Image (cartoon, rainbow, N blue to C red):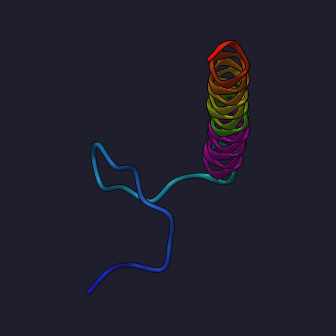
Amino acid sequence: MASVLPQCSWCGKELKENEVRNSKEEILKQWENNKKQYEHQKSIEQHGKDVRKSFEQDLRRRI
């Protein structure tokens, strides 16, 4: 059964309060980075869709 107390993923010992705080900060930083990367990826995908739509419209006008 998993422990409720935060444990070190490397050695399995209980983390001290400052270590828990640091790991929470790392988790939040990683979450923010992931969120930024996701938003950037969505932006790139939307730009690709817009470019394709514009290209297709341009081709229709020329035909």
Count the marks.
0
Where, by quadrant of the figure, is residue 56 drawn? top right
Q: Residue at x 71, y 26 (%)?
A: 57
Which residue reaches farthest top? 62
Quarter location, residue 60? top right
Q: Residue 18 or 44: which is nearer the viewer?
A: 44
- Residue at point 65%, 18% (across, down): 55
Left or right, 55 with reference to 11: right
On whether residue 27 falls in the magenta region, the answer is yes
Q: Position of residue 32 (x, y in %)?
A: 73, 39
Which quadrant holds the C terminus? top right
Magenta stretch: dominant secondary structure = helix
Which image quarter is the N terminus in? bottom left
Q: Nearer the viewer, residue 24 or 8?
A: 24
The x and y percentages for residue 28 are 71, 45
- Range of magenta residues: 20-35
Q: Is residue 15 magenta?
A: no
